[in-house]
């Protein structure tokens, strides 16, 4: 699965891990915890979208956000700046389907979760290392 990340991208695997917020939740969760209606807006009969960050006491009552991302699934992760640079550099080329970007990295879900806790020298590891604020790793 492809996933992008960057400071301006406010959804997706990497953002969700750093923010600890459930960007989208199912209708079943809201029916089970009606207090969530204050923080989410109904998108359709199955899905709700986050409109206001959840307070810590509500977050503790939800399963950890990392649970929705499979440890076994492979993710091709790309920094948004690298993705845009690649697009701009190749605007005049006709290649058909492009199956990768040079600076993309491939990790399993488990590897990404471990990188958040123990960043290495990979591009994603360095991104995690440079993030400011509380990522509350106990909730992963």
Image (cartoon, rainbow, N blue to C red):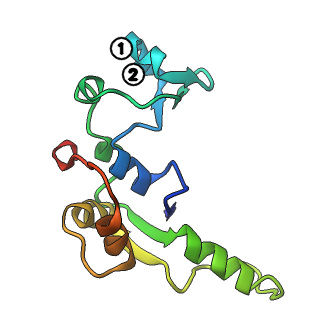
Q: Position of residue 82 (x, y in %)?
A: 56, 77
Q: CA distance from mark 1 to mark 2?
A: 5 Å
Q: State the image quarter where residue 114 is shown.
A: bottom left
In the rendered image of this protein, does residue 134 appear above or below residue 80? above
> Which residue is at 41% across, 37% downward?
22
Q: Residue furthest front?
A: 132
In the picture provided, is 7 more to the left or to the right than 81?
left
Q: Which residue is mark 2?
A: 29
Q: Is residue 12 visible?
A: yes
Q: How many marks?
A: 2
Q: Mark 2: give few (<14), some (14-19) or many (20+) Cα within 10 Å.
A: few
Q: Residue furthest left?
A: 138
In the picture provided, is 44 more to the left or to the right than 97?
left
In the rendered image of this protein, does residue 128 appear above or below residue 49? below
In the rendered image of this protein, does residue 5 appear above or below residue 84? above
> Which residue is at 34% across, 51% downward?
17
Q: Position of residue 135 (x, y in %)?
A: 27, 50
Q: Which residue is mark 1?
A: 32
- Which of these two is toward me, 25 or 116? 116
- Which of these two is toward me, 10 or 131? 131
């Amino acid at each position: 699965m492809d996933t992008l990340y960057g400071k301006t991208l406010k959804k997706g695997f990497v953002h969700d891990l750093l923010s600890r917020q459930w960007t989208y939740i199912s209708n079943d969760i809201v029916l089970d915890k009606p207090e969530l209606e204050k923080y989410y807006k109904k998108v359709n009969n199955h899905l709700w979208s986050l409109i206001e960050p959840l307070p810590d006491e509500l977050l503790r009552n939800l399963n950890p956000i990392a649970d929705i991302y499979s440890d076994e699934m492979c993710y091709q992760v790309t920094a948004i700046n690298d993705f845009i640079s690649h697009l701009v550099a190749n605007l005049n080329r006709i290649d058909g389907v492009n199956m990768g970007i040079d600076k993309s990295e491939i990790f399993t879900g488990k590897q990404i979760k471990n990188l958040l806790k123990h960043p290495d020298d990979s591009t994603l590891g360095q991104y995690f290392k440079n993030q400011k604020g509380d990522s509350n790793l106990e909730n992963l």
